[in-house]
Amino acid sequence: MVCRHLSGLTNAELRNLKTRISDYLAFRQDVDAFLDQYFSSLCTETCYQSRLSACCSRDGIITFFADAVINALESSEAQLDLLKERLASPHQGNKCVYLGETGCLWQVRPLVCAMFLCDKAEKEVLNKNLRAKGTWDKLKQREKSYRWPDRAILFDDIEDLFINAGYDSTLMYLHKSPGLLRIKAMRDG
Ligand code: SF4
């Protein structure tokens, strides 16, 4: 659905959309840099080498509709084909369907995945390093500014764009989740 709509946009419309997500992508780079600096060795040792990857479990993923749109905008056709193949094949095991041999197959992982830290990681790093904790708290605030609808937010705008074009998806939480709709109603008075 996302690919179909994006392929019908004009170059100018695509450029506009890419400009609209550029600030979010900069935020995601900051998240990746932070995780790389403070968690890379711990996560590699604890989960990757042991092939535990507990956070990428079958039921662990919550994806916003905007996650799929942003990932599609940042992916090549071949990268998107790989995701489609994964979804079309029968899925066994207890790992997320998008987990490949070298990690996540998304180019821009879903936001909830990117911001997930397990209890062990939080305890080992954030509880012992106030500077890291301060940076993480700021990143969590920035995260809210894209997906928490107590103000106008990117994820809501992206859903609007597709709804106005006649699309509907269960992943459009900003238009379907009773909790999020309540927050929007309070915001709009
Ligand atoms: S989408 Fe990617 S990061 Fe998220 S759970 Fe699946 S493999 Fe892991």
Image (cartoon, grey):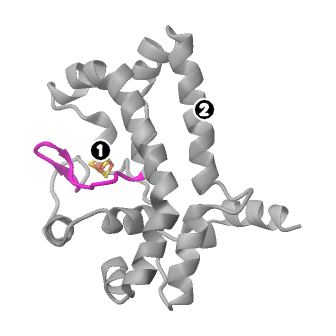
Mark 1 close to ligand 1, CB under 8 Å: yes
Q: Is residue 177 left or right of residue 161?
A: right
Whether residue 170 is visible here, answered yes or no, is no
Instruction: Give percent across and percent down for residue 159.
Output: 54, 74
Q: Is residue 43 left or right of residue 50?
A: right
Residue shown at 59%/43% (left/top)?
142
Q: Which mark is residue 57?
A: 1
Question: The residue under label 1 is which amino acid type?
Answer: Ser
Question: The residue under label 2 is which amino acid type?
Answer: Lys
| Kind of element beneath mark 2 | helix
Residue shown at 74%/56% (left/top)?
150
Q: Which mark is residue 138?
A: 2
Provide the residue span drawn in magenta. Answer: 98-110
Give the quarter of the figure containing the C terminus.
Answer: bottom right
Q: Are marks 1 and 2 in contact (CB under 8 Å)?
A: no
Residue shown at 50%/10% (left/top)?
129
Q: Which is nearer the eye, 162 or 101? A: 162
Instruction: Give percent across and percent down for residue 58.
Output: 29, 50
Instruction: Give percent across and percent down for residue 127.
Output: 52, 12
